[in-house]
Amino acid sequence: MPSINLRSGRVRVALAAALGALVVVPVAVNSLSPAGASTPLSAAGLKITVSGPATVIATQAYKITVSGDDRVCGVMEGTTNQIDRTKPYRLTFSPKNLSAGPHKLSIAAIGCSDTNSFPVYGSATKTVTVPVHVESYSRWIAPASSTAADRKLALKVSTAQAGVTVKLMRGSKTVRSLGSRSTKAATYRWKPAGVAQGDYTLAVTSGGSTVKMRTTITNGWAPMQAPFPRCKTLTWRYDASGEPARAAGIEKDLRGAFTRVSKVTGLTFKQVRTGGTITVDWGGAARFPDGGNDAAGVGGSTVSGGRAVSGGLTLNTASTWVGAAGFGHDANAFPARGGLILHELGHVLGLGHVTSKKALMYPVSSNGSPSTLTAYERAGLKALYPAC
Ligand SMILES: [Zn+2]
C-alpha cells in the first residue's frame, strides 16, 4: 500500500528543551495509510508507521492497539497505549464514537522516558472520512422483558453519503433484512417474532463500507443496565447502620450472594471496610415511604462510557423479608432473604426484570418463588459476563 511521508522536524526542534539530560534517538511519524489527503476509514483502521524509540498518541479519542511488543512504558491517556520501540513499528487506530463524515486527525510521536518527561519528536495530520457511524443500537433484545424498550431493536445510524442498508445476520447468513433508506441519517426499530435466541450480527452498509456489531436475542431475562467490566475484582462494603434486629447475621448471606454470583460471572468480589465499588446499606422511610408495604430492596448501578462504574444495593429497614436467613424457603414456602439479596445484586450487575414467575428476576416474590439464582439469571449473567 502506498504511503505518504509526514516527517516533521520542526516539532522536534521546538521541544528539544524538554529533553533535559535524556539521550533519546529522534523519532518521526513516517507514514499514514491508507494514503491520500482524505481517505475512507475502514473497519481495519488507520495504519501509522513510526521510527525510533517513541510513543504515539492521538489527540482525538482513538484507541491505539499494538501487537508483537511487550515493552510498554506506561499509559498516559485513558484510551492510549504507549509503547517503547527501537525499530519502526505500526499502529492501528480504531475509530471510536466518531460521527460520519470527515475528521482531521493529529498524531504526535513522543519520547518514552523514565523521568516523566515526554518530548514530542514528530507529528502528522491527516483527514479521514468515516463512512458509517452507528450512533446507538440495542446490544440485547429480550422479548420476555417487562420493559418495552428491551423488547425491540432500536438502531440509529449516520452516514457520510446518502443511502444505508441494515441486515440482521447469524454467521454469514442473513436472517432478516431490516430495510434500506436513501437518507444520510436513519433510525430502525424492529421487534423479533419467531427468531431463535442467540448471538446475531447487525450489518450496517453505506458507501461500500460495512460496520458490524453483535446483538443478542434472549428470552426470560433482560438487561437493565450496562455490566461492569468482566473478569475483574470488584470491592463491596456493607454499611450496617440501620440494620434491624431481625436481620442479624445478614452479612453472612450477603457474602453468600456475592460468592454465588462470582461463580457465574467470573467476577471476584472483595469485601472492604471503607470505600467499595458496590455499597450495601439500609434505607428507612425516606427511601421506602410505604414502609413494610414498599419494595423490600432496590439495586442498581451508575454507568459511564457504556460500563457500570459503581453499584448500590439498599435494603428496606421495614421489610419483614429480611428476617428469614439463608437461601432456602420459610415454613410458608416463602423465599428467604438470600433471594432478595441476589435479586437486587442481579440489578446491580445489569439484569432487569422478566415476565416469567420461575425466574428470580420476576419483580414480585410469593409462595414458591425462587430463593436463589435460576437458569434464567445464569443465562443472563453469562451473556453479560462471558467466560474469562
Ligand atoms: Zn427488581
Image: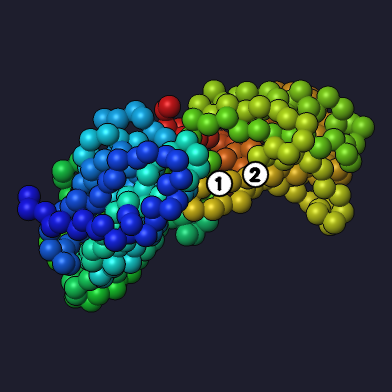
Reply above or below: 130 against 249: below
Q: Residue furthest front?
A: 21
Q: Position of residue 208 (x, y in %)?
A: 12, 61
Residue under circle 1?
308
Residue closest to the eye, 228 or 255: 228
Say what secondary structure mark 2 lies in. strand
Residue under circle 2?
311
Label 1 is placed on what type of residue?
Answer: Ala
Report the residue at 88% width, 39% height from top: 241
Residue closest to the eye, 332 or 349: 349
Report the residue at 26% width, 63% height from top: 125
Q: Mark 1 vs ligand 1: CB under 8 Å?
A: no
Q: Position of residue 62 (x, y in %)?
A: 36, 54
Left or right: 176 in relation to 318 = left
Q: Position of residue 166 (x, y in %)?
A: 23, 60
Residue closest to the eye, 83 or 12: 12
Can the viewer see residue 42 in this picture?
no
Q: Are marks 1 and 2 in contact (CB under 8 Å)?
A: yes
Q: Residue furthest left?
A: 2
Residue closest to the eye, 84 or 388: 84
- The residue carrying pointer 2 sits among few (fewer than 14), some (14 to 19) or many (20 or more) residues within 10 Å by Cα, namely many
